[in-house]
Amino acid sequence: MSAPETSSQVDHDARFRQEAQDAFAVDISNISSEQDMLDELTSIRSFSFHFIKDALRSPAAVSEVAQQGLNQLWHMFLETAKVFDSESAYQEKLVALLLWTKEFDSLYRSLHPTKTAAGSWEGYRFASSLQASWEPLLTTGTASQQRNLAAFSAKALAVGVCRDSIGLTALWYLREALETDDEAKVIHLLPATVVWIEQCSDHLLAFSAMDHSSEESSKAQLLAPGALGQKAGIDQHGYSMKRWLLWRRRLQELSHNADPAVAKTAKKGFMRMINCGNNLDYNVPGEAKFNEKLQAVMGEALVKSGKDSVDGDDVDINVDWVD
């Protein structure tokens, strides 16, 4: 293990973090091209080397100074995620870079087993930083920032990054977005809600089927059902099939919204949810009935069309077939 940090080292690290923060703030505010995005990824990778090795070289465990560096690294990831468009390939690259930091941490530990701090990459508090980034974004963030961070968060969950912790952030978000009786809030958050569902719906269903939760008292505020969940008689904290069906019902209802844009977005989310059970060979109430009706309507459309095949885009799908 390395020697304890001296005051001069602490001061040097603080200056480095401040300079890195200032440079990042300038760079992130000036992203306007693909080259800018590539440069940002390269910059984050460079800082990842520095901050992760600082954490690994800490005596006994990750020091508070090293954690401050990691917090800054996660800030770079999350602020960049808010800027990269939710449908951009650069979101995939950003998630891949996050996975790389985990792999680099593991490789470095393997090469220096007696010289690295105890613990694991999961202990670097990425998931906590993600949750903390989301909380103000619900009320002060733009719709674009919400969609973009939803894409990054859900993609990270989909590839298994901090699976349990990010799963609880997803649960918290869906409670705020679909279990509230504040209709304006539901509609405001709907685009990001659908991004979450599109990108990690299989995880959300699996968590719901397995009643995924947490015993940590610090996570309690993420687990409780919202106002509509409580009205529906849901008292179980954490994921449950009842909550999954409530979310699906909310999207079904919103698919009939008078605003065509809201209705279209909600239907997109509903359609992703209605096929999840089939993807996982898991029996979800209403899915078989919906798919039976869909197949019958598609069969009729095929006969009328004279084509060799038709798909869902060729028929008028009614979300109420689930009832």
Image: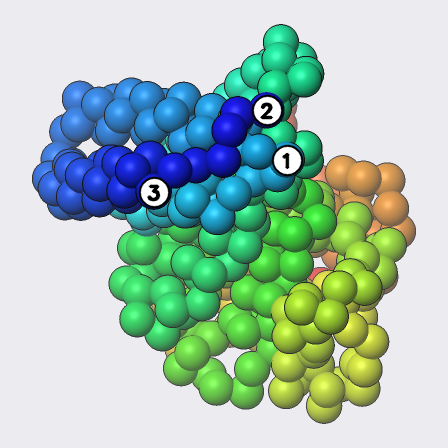
Residue with the mark numbered 3: 7
Q: Report if residue 173 is visible in the image.
A: yes
Which label belongs to residue 84? none
Question: What secondary structure is marked by label 1?
Answer: loop
Distance from the alpha carbon under mark 3 to that under mark 2? 18 Å
| 296 or 121: nearer the viewer | 121
Indicate which disc, 3 or 2, sits on the residue closer to the N terminus: 2
Q: Which residue is mark 1?
A: 60
**Which residue does the image show at 46% across and 61% down from the upper left?**
132
Graded by Cα atoms within 10 Å as few (under 14), some (14 to 19) or many (20 or more), the crowding at tag 2 reads some
Question: Looking at the picture, which amino acid does disc 1 mark?
Answer: Ala
Please give the name of the residue rendered at 73% of the width and 70% of the height, measured from the top-left corner. 217
Marks 1 and 3, how far apart at CA: 18 Å
Pick the residue in front: 283 or 242.
242
Q: Earlier in the sequence, mark 1 or mark 3?
A: 3
- Mark 2 lies on a secondary structure that is loop
User: x%, y% of residue 78?
Assistant: 38, 46
Looking at the image, tell me whether mark 1 or mark 2 is earlier in sequence order: 2
Q: With 3 as the anchor, is 208 left or right in this view?
A: right
In the depicted structure, whether residue 215 falls above or below residue 305: below
Q: How many marks?
A: 3
Image quadrant holding the N terminus, namely top right
Which residue is pictured at 27% across the width and 42% down the height?
11
Judge whether residue 28 can be spotted in this image. Answer: no
**Residue labelled with disc 2:** 1
